[in-house]
């Protein structure tokens, strides 16, 4: 399965060019450190394999070595690397004009994320940026699945379901109007509706500003909808989503009380 994934993704890359979010703002690591990482990768270290790809693709912009290490990184399935690659494919999908191309890009993103999910144990609950990396991985899988579904079938069926009170359908529509049909007005409307219906990703977490009391109400509602959270995945997924909802609630209450400065009361604490 992994070999097939490598073949498919490299074929897509050859057809459309390899997307990377390369940034010249980061200095290359010393060659000695890179060689040490390569040795670890050669010994089967999953994280090191991904870090070598990131160095060549995102920092050094070495296309030849980036392609070689992309293949190795996909085989290894480092979740951080899969997430980075998938994010690039998602943006390619948003920019694509033809639906058939969007489907290719979103499918590629989803395959990458599902490939990295097998090594989800490597994702921390508290990453370097002070964020719950497990939750964001789950959120990225869900957005890729939703974009693929609505790009394939259109929004009409989801509108019908959302109008009957489905929080998941409202989520799909908010996602659709960002990734598939870029319409910020409709996106904002459906984000708000998804929050009101207790969708765990959008509850109290929407683009449009509104009173904190409404955010708190929606987060509490989402936390109480355990069957909806259970539909998102296994216990690992449910724990990640629930932890983020609780942090979201604590953060919203913190700032609603009039406190200022950086919020530090969540489950993820950084030095």
Image (cartoon, grey):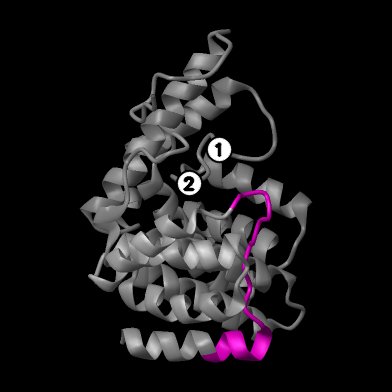
**Is any part of residue 180 visible from this angle?**
no
Residue, x 56% and y 74% (percent of image)? 106
Q: Is residue 166 left or right of residue 237?
A: right
Locate residue 142, reporting x and y percent: 46, 61
Please tell me which residue is depicted at 65% across the width and 73% down the height of the picture.
93
Indicate whether 261 appears above or below 75: above
Q: Quadrant of residue 15?
A: bottom right
Looking at the rendered image, the quarter that the N terminus falls into is bottom left
Residue at the outermost front position: 32
Q: Do the numbered discs 1 and 2 sit on residues whose CB atoms are within 8 Å?
A: yes
Disc number for residue 201: 2
Kindly identify which numbered label has been placed on residue 137. Answer: none
In the displayed structure, does residue 197 sit left or right of residue 236?
right
- In magenta, the rendered stretch is 11-27
- Looking at the rendered image, the quarter that the C terminus falls into is top left
Is 127 above or below relative to 106?
Answer: above
Report which residue position mark 1 lands on: 205
Query: What secondary structure do most residues of the magenta stretch adopt?
Result: loop
Q: Is residue 249 magenta?
A: no
Indicate the position of residue 97 as horizontal and vertical percent values. Answer: 77, 79
Up-down relation of residue 174 to residue 53 (above or below)? above
Above or below: residue 222 compared with residue 213: below
Image coords of residue 99 (percent x, y): 69, 82
């Amino acid at each position: 399965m992994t070999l097939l994934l490598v073949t498919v993704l490299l074929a897509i890359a050859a057809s459309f060019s390899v997307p990377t979010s390369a940034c010249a703002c980061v200095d290359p690591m010393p060659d000695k450190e890179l060689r040490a990482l390569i040795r670890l990768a050669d010994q089967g270290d999953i994280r090191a394999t991904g870090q070598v790809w990131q160095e060549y693709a995102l920092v050094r912009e070495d296309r030849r070595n980036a392609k070689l290490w992309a293949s190795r990184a996909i085989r290894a399935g480092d979740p951080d690397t899969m997430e980075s690659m998938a994010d690039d494919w998602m943006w390619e999908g948003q920019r694509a004009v033809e639906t058939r191309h969007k489907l290719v890009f979103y499918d590629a993103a989803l395959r990458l994320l599902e490939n990295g999910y097998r090594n989800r144990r490597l994702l921390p609950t508290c990453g370097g940026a002070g964020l719950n990396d497990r939750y964001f991985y789950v959120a990225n899988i869900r957005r890729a699945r939703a974009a693929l579904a609505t790009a394939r079938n259109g929004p009409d069926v989801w509108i019908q379901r959302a109008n009957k009170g489905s929080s998941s359908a409202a989520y799909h529509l908010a996602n659709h109007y960002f990734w598939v049909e870029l319409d910020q007005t409709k996106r904002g409307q459906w984000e708000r509706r998804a929050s009101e219906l207790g969708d765990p990703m959008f509850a109290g977490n929407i683009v449009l500003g509104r009173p904190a009391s409404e955010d708190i109400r929606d987060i509490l509602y989402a936390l109480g909808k355990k069957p909806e959270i259970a539909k998102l995945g296994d216990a690992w997924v449910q724990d990640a989503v629930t932890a983020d909802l609780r942090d979201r609630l604590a953060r919203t209450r913190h700032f609603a009380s009039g406190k200022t400065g950086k919020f530090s009361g969540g489950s993820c604490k950084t030095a």
